[in-house]
Image: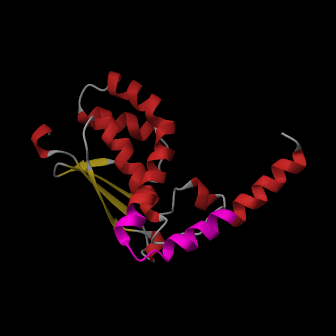
Amino acid sequence: MDNDLAETAEGIVRRWLPALMEGLDQITDEEQRIKILEFCGRSCAEHDFEEIARIKDEARDREHLLQLINERIPWCGDWVWEDGKVRTVCAACGCPLVVEGYVNRSPTFCLCSRGWVRAVFGEALGEEVNVELVQAIGRGDECCEFLVFPNPLRS
C-alpha cells in the first residue's frame, strides 16, 4: 500500500472511530448498543480462536485452561477461578484501540471488551457464558473487573 494512502487511511480511522463511538453513545436503546459492541468484541476475539483451540487440546483441567489463557492470550489482568466464576481485575484499559489512541474510553466502548470476554470464554469453555462488567475504567471506576459465569451444570 502506498505510504501516503496508508497515512490517509490511519487519519480517517482516527477520526471515524471516535465519531462512530459518539454516535453509538447517542443510541437510547441500551440493548442495541450492547448487541453492536459485543458483536465488535467477538470479531476482535476471533483472532484468538486458533490459539484457544490449541489451549483446549493441551489443558488438563479448568485450572490449567486458565493458566494457559493467562500465558498465551494477551489481556490486562490475570484470570482466576473464584466461587465457580472466572474473574479478572485490570488496573489499566487493555484494549489496543484505546491504548493506541484510536478511541477514547467510554461506558459504551467498554461493552466491546465484554463481547471479547464472552467470545474468548465461550470458545475456551465450549459453552455460552454470561459476562458481567462489574467495574470499568471507561465508566469512571479505578479498574476494570470482569466476571464470567459458565454454565453451572458443567463445572
Q: Quadrant of residue 30?
A: bottom left
Q: Residue at x 38, y 42 (%)?
A: 120
Which picture quadrant has residue 132? bottom left
Where does the C terminus fall, quadrant-wise? top left
Q: Residue 18: x and y, percent?
A: 63, 68
Quarter of the image for residue 61 reads: top left
Of all residues, the one furthest to the top in this rendering is 57
Q: Is residue 143 above or below residue 40?
A: below
Q: How is this picture coloured?
A: secondary structure
Residue 21 belongs to magenta span: yes
User: Magenta region, mostly helix, strand or loop?
Assistant: helix
Magenta stretch contains residue 103: no
Q: Quadrant of the N terminus?
A: top right
Can residue 39 be spotted in the picture?
A: yes
- Seen from the viewer's position, the closer of residues 84 and 16 is 16
Query: Percent from the top left, x then y, of residue 31?
Result: 34, 66
User: On the rendered structure, is 22 left or right of 138?
Assistant: right
Residue 91: give x, y in percent of width and height. Answer: 46, 63
Task: Determine whether, in the image, residue 26 is placed left or right of residue 87.
Answer: right
